[in-house]
Image (cartoon, rainbow, N blue to C red):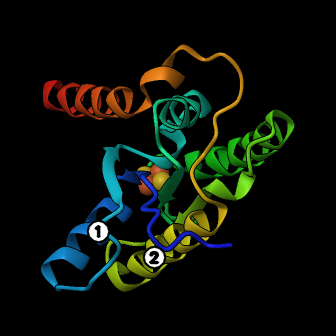
Amino acid sequence: MVNENFEPKIVGFCCNWCSYRAADLAGTARIKYSPNVRVLRVMCSGRVDPSFVMKALASGADGVLIAGCHPGECHYIEQNYKAMRRYSILKHTLRAMGVEPDRVRLVWASAAEGQQLAEAIDLLVADVRKLGPLKWPGNWTENGQREEALETLLKEHEEALEVV
Ligand code: FES
């Protein structure tokens, strides 16, 4: 049964050259999308190491979005193909750990596709809402303080970008 009161926390890793701009466009064009996503800018979807996703989930996120340029349009030639391969392995790993793989999604959105990105965000939030809160398995240290850990993770990421 879907818990309508559950507000999933989603971390969105968005490529600087396309989907981050699409998120920006959605904002400036007043396209509404779910506020459950905290968007983090990365230079390319290929920069999203699977450990980033695991850390986000272990730190309190209920789902993760990875958004990059369309295949063939990556500014770093073919790094988004690497993202696709990693995504596939990541889903297998999550399944093996007992975590629903649908909590993580890879999407493509060009800088002009604010509407499409907004729809992809809303869809992921709706799907994660159906799954319910993530019960991160095992004795991960972050488990006890997931709320706090996610805020720390997001802050660290934002600070790291300021240095770049
Ligand atoms: Fe956007 Fe590589 S530069 S996915």
Q: Residue placed at 70% from the left, 59% from the top?
A: 102
Residue 106 image-quadrant placement: bottom right
In this view of the protein, which residue sits in the foreground, 76 or 36?
A: 36
Left-right relation of 150 to 26 = right
Mark 2 lies on a secondary structure that is: helix
Q: Amino acid at mark 2?
A: Asp
Of badges 1 and 2, the one in the foreground is 2
Q: Residue placed at 69% from the left, 47% from the top?
A: 87
Left-right relation of 128 to 1 = left
| Mark 1 or mark 2, earlier in chain | 1
The quadrant of the rendering that contains the N terminus is bottom right
Residue 137 image-quadrant placement: top right
Residue bearing mark 2: 122
Q: Amino acid at mark 1?
A: Ala
The spot of residue 152 in percent (x, y) is 29, 26
Q: Residue placed at 62% from the left, 46% from the top?
A: 83
Residue bearing mark 1: 23
Alpha carbon of mark 1 to alpha carbon of mark 2: how far? 12 Å
The spot of residue 146 in percent (x, y) is 44, 30
Left-right relation of 79 to 111 = right
Local packing at callout 2 (Cα closer than 10 Å; few below 14, some 14-19, many 20+) is some
Residue 111 image-quadrant placement: bottom left
The spot of residue 131 in percent (x, y) is 66, 61
Q: Does any portion of residue 72 appear in the rendered image?
A: no
Left-right relation of 102 to 57 = right
Residue 50 image label: none
Q: Residue placed at 37% from the left, 26% from the top?
A: 149
The quadrant of the rendering that contains the C terminus is top left
The residue carrying mark 1 has its beta carbon less than 8 Å from ligand 1: no
Q: Does any portion of residue 42 appear in the rendered image?
A: yes
